[in-house]
Image (cartoon, rainbow, N blue to C red):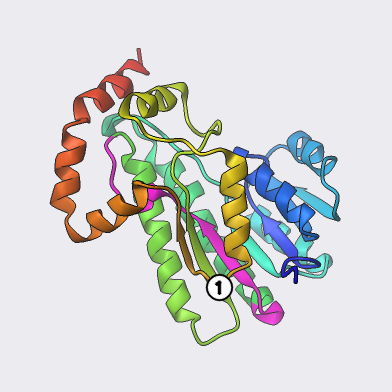
Amino acid sequence: MNLLAGKTVLLTGATGGIGAEVAKQLSAEGARLILTGRSVEKLRALQNHLAAETLIYPCDLTDATEQQGLLQFCQQHRGIDVLINNAGISQFDLCPKQNYSELVSINLLVPMQLCQLFLPMLRQHKGQILNVGSAFGSIGHPGFTGYCATKFGLRGFTEALQRELSGSDIQVKYFAPRATETSINSSEVVQLNQQLGNHMDSPDWVAQQLVRQLKSNDLRCFLGWPERIFVRLNGVFPALVDMGLKSKLTLIELFAVGKTR
């Protein structure tokens, strides 16, 4: 039984590396898609490669007026059954050079606001919400202070909303990939991961795991070993993770400082 066939899915960040693969796999599952992103050209190009019925709505989700426009667009097209908050950005730099306001706006406030905005519609459709977080939503990592903070916040929001809606027909899920081979990672981050021996997953595989979670009753999904071990270890014995990352700090700082030269 295909649980996604005929369901309408709103996917933010649809033209990103993970988003585009998720769109392709959801389309293959027979889902009806509403894709959003900032580039109308990229959205149209993606739309042309998808088999199932696909609608696009280019907008800037950090703008409250455009959020309302997206809601009205979805209402005009029979509503949605699934909201996937996938849009996000990352910054690799030392604390003094981070743009925290942009990170907080896109990675945290936008998914919170969209959940709030679409809850009445999702109640009617007995739908589900899937928020895309990160392994760094459970592990504070040097060079990613702003990104970690926003993903920690998104994980907390998702968990609280899960529990708030536990008596309802809406499922709220948290999906946490590790480093993925997409343009969200700068060349410095790719080189750093290579030096540290960190594995980077393909967006196709990550999208497969996301779609699998959508079709399951799993409320939480953390990808990758040893990242899943570190997530648990950091929750119980954070001092051990402190020591592990401290030994890598010189290398992290080298790449972070080098990118600004």
Q: Residue furthest bottom?
A: 167
Counting from the top left corner in percent of width and height, residue 253 is at 25, 25
| Residue 79, image quadrant | bottom right
Total count of labels: 1
Picture coordinates of residue 149 (x, y %)? 34, 49
> Quarter of the image containing the C terminus?
top left
Q: Is residue 149 magenta?
A: no
- Which residue does the numbered mark 1 point to in the structure image? 217
Residue 79 relative to residue 228: left or right: right
Identify whether 218 is placed above or below 12: below
Q: Quadrant of the N terminus?
A: bottom right
Decide if residue 59 is in sight here.
no
Q: Residue furthest top?
A: 261
Q: Residue at x 51, y 69 (%)?
A: 218
In depth, the one of 136 and 91 nearer the eye is 136
Point 47% across, 26% down: residue: 186
Circle 1: residue type: Asn
Q: Is residue 1 above or below residue 148?
A: below
Residue occupying image coordinates x 21% and y 30%: 249
Tell me the quarter of the picture where residue 11 sits.
bottom right
Looking at the rendered structure, the secondary structure element under dot 1 is loop
The image position of residue 227, as x and y in percent, is 35, 47
Magenta extent: 123-142
On whether residue 135 falls in the magenta region, the answer is yes
Residue 119 in percent (x, y) is at: 61, 73
* Image position of 196 with respect to 54: above or below: above
**Residue 134 seen anywhere in this rendered image of the structure:** yes
For residue 223, side relative to residue 24 (left or right): left
